[in-house]
Amino acid sequence: MDLNNPVFIGSNIYRDSPFGRHHPLRVARVPAATDLARALGWLPDTRFRLSPRAKPAAVTGWHDAGYVAALCRAESEGGLPADLAARYGLGTLSNPLHPKVWSRPATGAGGVLWAADALAHAGTGRIHVPGGGTHHGMPDRANGFCYLNDPVLGIRALLAAGLTRIVYVDIDAHHPDGVEFAFAGEPRVRMISVHEEARWPFTGALSDTAGGSAFNLPVPAGFDDTGMRAALEDLILPRTAAFRPEAIVLQCGADALREDPLSRLALSNNAHWSVVAALAPLTPRFLVLGGGGYNPWSVARCWAGVWATLAGEEIPDHLPEAAQAVLAALDWAGGARPPPARELLTTLRDAPRAGRLDPEIRTRLSLLARR
């Protein structure tokens, strides 16, 4: 595939959620973003690649072989003995045993591994894998809705290909504990995370440097576009540029948007698109992943705009009928949450959500700047 043009990696496996009516991942996410991009004419066949599915051997370089075998067994046999499930963090409310417990995460991992390999060997390129970004997965257990850790697998693949300077940026509402665990003390990887403080998994403190490899900015509830602009200008961009990255991996979780039910942050999707646009010129290889995000309308609009930013497409002020139909067809897939505001059905770009910069954020950025 020609990487002179940006590539979008997707799969039909995401069209039917296997998580059940009470899990946050029951809502449409990747297919909604894919369909919206197609309805806007941004996703011709020349830019789209169907995600391959990773084989067990491809993920056991970091994941425990027994854990991977348990995922495969759970899918093939329809479950696991209780003691085996408990050993690997499976069968819980957050990480249920479901009919695609191996194939779905293996598809996300396969897309990210393909992208990492393609970027490493092409030398330049931009690839969006919205089905990736499962940054909580641990080597031997499921964690925080994440069964495999595809950001870790992708970064490891870039390192194995000979790259020596990789920057991982994470703007999900939740701290990437699995990624930090994998690369703590690794001099070839720099990790930068902006995440909500006092939010699960309760890691990523300001003082946490992961052996010198990480810069963590926990932010308070109500964090808005003004705060993200400060984080981008005073932390993300200078620390990224100083590392002279050969590749950047951006986890672009949409759960920091104001409409998301699983955080208390208040970003507009403009903040995500600004991060994508600002990071792209700093590296020859840019891999943008999905991540969290549990409001189907805000996730679809955000990730479609992420793709537009990568692909150089112009975002319209008002969506055409075909794009509005994609958004109108979405629902909460259970529960009693209110319907979306009208602008979530007729526009792609949120109104900016700016405010006064929290003095505590300024103080924390100053502390990080002195490291």
Image (cartoon, rainbow, N blue to C red):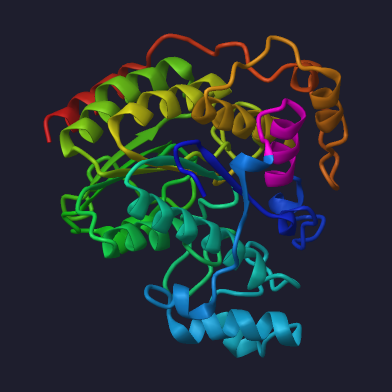
Q: Can residue 178 be seen in this view?
A: no
Q: Position of residue 149 (x, y in %)?
A: 47, 62
Residue at image position (55%, 30%) is 306
Specify whether residue 137 is painted magenta: no
Vertical side of 245 occupied by 351: above or below: above
- The C terminus lies in quadrant: top left
Q: Position of residue 23 (x, y in %)?
A: 73, 55
Q: Which of 7 and 111 is in front in this view?
A: 7
Residue at image position (86%, 20%) is 321
Residue 284 located left or right of residue 3: left
Quarter residue 325 falls in? top right
Vertical side of 337 occupied by 233: above or below: above
Quarter residue 183 falls in? bottom left
Q: How many marks?
A: 0
Specify whether residue 32 is painted magenta: yes
Q: Nearer the viewer, residue 248 or 331?
A: 248
Residue at image position (40%, 58%) is 117
Residue 27 located left or right of residue 180: right
Q: Can residue 73 be seen in this view?
A: yes
Quarter residue 344 falls in? top right
Q: Position of residue 295 (x, y in %)?
A: 70, 37
Q: Where is residue 26 in the image (x, y as percent from the top left)?
A: 76, 52
Main SS of the magenta part reads helix
Magenta-colored span: 29-44
Q: Nearer the viewer, residue 294 or 62?
A: 62
Residue at image position (37%, 17%) is 358
Q: Residue furthest left?
A: 370
